[in-house]
Each structure stands twice: as C-alpha cells, then as structure tokens.
Image: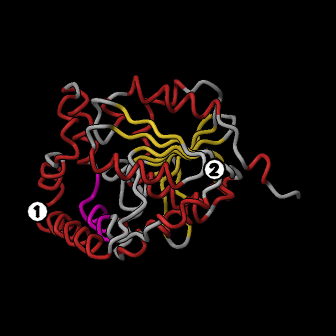
C-alpha cells in the first residue's frame, strides 16, 4: 500500500498485478482490501487498483465534510488513475463506491472503460426526501461523535438493509464486524455528512450521457435498492441489470459464488466503447 496525495488529501492505494487496469471501490465502513477475496479468481491478468475512500481505512479523514463529497472523490480517483498511467480502467463499485463510480462515469468518462455497479444509487431527486436523508445521516454521525465506533457498528449492522447478512456464516460475520470496527469514528461521521445520498448531486438526468458498457447488480431482498438499480439501468444506454433472488444489499459478501461469475464474465465479454470513441493522438 502507498499514500497518494491529491487535492490536499491522501488516499491509501494498492496496485497489484499486470494487465488491463481494474479499479475496485468499496462501500461505506469498508476499505480497499474488502475486494481481496475476488482478486485471485480474475480470469485474465489484471492490474488491480484498490483504494480506501476518504474517512475509511488508512486514508486521510479531512475534518471538513465537503472534502468527502462524492463529486470531489470521483475527481480524485480519476486523477489517481491518470497519475498512475492506468486510465481508462474498468471500474467496479459497491454502494458508496458505486455512487463514486457512477459519478466518475458521468463527469470523468475518459477514465472509465467498463462500469460495474453493485447496489448503486443515482442520488435522491426529491428535495424533501433528500433533506430527510441528510437528517438521518446526521443522526448517525452524531452517534459516532457521541458514542464511538462500537455503538455505531452495532446499530449499523441492525439496519433492515443488512438483514440478509445475518444469514452469512458466523466466521464471515465476525470478520466483517471486525473490519468495520477498524474505522475511525470521526472519519465515518465526516463521510456520512459529506458523501451520503442526501448530500450528493442527483444524477438521474445525466445517466443518458454514460458511454461505458454497464452492468448493474442488486439483490432482490433489497427492495429500495432494486428500485434504484432499475432506474439506473434503464437510464444508461445499453446497460444490463442483474437482480439476484434471495440476496440483499451486498451480493459480493452474501453470495460470492453467484456474484463472482457475473463480475468476471462482464469484464471478459464487454467491449469498451472507448475503443471506438477515443480521440486520435
């Protein structure tokens, strides 16, 4: 792992392997190493790039929530890919990471070859609903400020959206719980305030401009997430949608044997539109 400073903030970044670049972006309370179980099974050699988002893992946690904004982190990750000479890359994102990945495809299309979105959101279009989400996220952030990481993780894991995780093997649940506790409360609080769904710019009206071949994956038990995923897949030209029955918000954790083939087949089969759209040098 190595720190890469960009626009005044340092990201923990790990680059491994050789071949076409693949950027993997974790979800809220996660870190780049969350993707490690999948990397040995890639069906072709890859240069994998994993990052800890701001406020997570070993990346910096700026005090200003605005520095954690989805819009700014998307620009940061695009800049990291360019600095590493690894753009365009195939981009995979889960939940919070999927929102960053989608923003990259909208605002930094030259760095995104293929786009794989797991349990994504394009933001909240209705202003009242967006304000309500900001209020809910602020309450969670205050819990982190007041009671610390253990109390927060205990409440977080009891949210209905993560109900399907309780069917995972105990050893996997324990590993996930320990990983969540590894985060710093101030970092997660700033992320909630600056990068939550209520804080991000809604992207529904910009989906038609996404040029990257796209696959959207979601679990059927995540009812709200399924609605969001359908809206994104229908808004992106040519996007495909996979809804996994019996699975909740985190297919890569809950059913890796079903998630992995979807990811690997997509990365192996889709032809990036950039191959035909790239400008001559």
- Is 160 magenta? The answer is no
Residue 141 lies, in percent from the top left, at 21, 67
Which residue range is magenta in the image? 183-193
The image's colour scheme reads secondary structure
Residue 249 placement: quadrant: top left
- Is 186 magenta? The answer is yes
Vertical arrangement, residue 83 with respect to residue 6, above or below: above
Residue 147 image label: 1
In screen coordinates, is 130 left or right of 141? right
Residue 70 lies, in percent from the top left, at 44, 65
Residue, x 65% and y 31% (percent of image)? 269
Which residue has dot 2 on it?
Answer: 212
Residue 208 lies, in percent from the top left, at 58, 60
Label 2 neighbourhood size at 10 Å, few (<14), some (14-19), many (20+)? Answer: many
In screen coordinates, is 238 left or right of 250? right
Q: Main SS type for the magenta part?
A: helix
Residue, x 60% and y 46% (percent of image)? 238
Farthest residue to the front: give it: 234
Residue 184 placement: quadrant: bottom left
Q: Looking at the picture, tell me which residue is in the foreground, 158 or 49.
A: 158
């Amino acid at each position: 792992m190595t720190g890469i400073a960009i626009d005044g903030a340092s990201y923990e970044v790990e680059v491994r392997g050789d071949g076409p670049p693949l950027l993997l972006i974790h979800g809220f309370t996660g870190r780049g190493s969350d993707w490690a179980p999948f990397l040995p099974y890639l069906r072709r050699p890859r240069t994998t790039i994993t990052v800890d988002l701001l406020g997570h893992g070993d990346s910096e946690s700026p005090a200003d929530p605005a520095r954690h904004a989805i819009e700014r982190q998307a620009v940061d990750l695009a800049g990291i890919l360019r600095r590493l000479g690894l753009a365009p890359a195939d981009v995979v994102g889960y939940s919070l990471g999927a929102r960053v990945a989608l923003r990259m495809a909208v605002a930094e299309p030259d760095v995104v070859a293929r786009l794989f979105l797991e349990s994504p959101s394009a933001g909240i279009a209705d202003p009242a609903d967006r304000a309500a989400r900001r209020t809910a996220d602020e309450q969670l952030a205050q819990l982190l400020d007041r009671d610390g990481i253990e109390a927060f993780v205990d409440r977080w894991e009891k949210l209905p959206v993560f109900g399907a995780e309780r069917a995972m093997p105990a050893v996997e649940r324990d590993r996930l719980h320990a990983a969540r506790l590894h985060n710093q409360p101030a970092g997660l609080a700033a992320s909630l305030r600056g990068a939550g769904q209520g804080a991000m710019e809604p992207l529904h009206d910009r989906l038609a401009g996404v040029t990257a071949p796209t696959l959207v994956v979601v679990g059927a038990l995540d009812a709200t997430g399924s609605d969001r995923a359908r809206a994104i897949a229908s808004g992106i030209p040519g996007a495909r949608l996979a809804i996994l029955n019996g699975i909740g918000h985190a297919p890569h954790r809950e059913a890796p044997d079903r998630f992995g083939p979807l990811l690997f087949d997509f990365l192996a089969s889709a032809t990036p539109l950039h191959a035909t759209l790239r400008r001559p040098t």
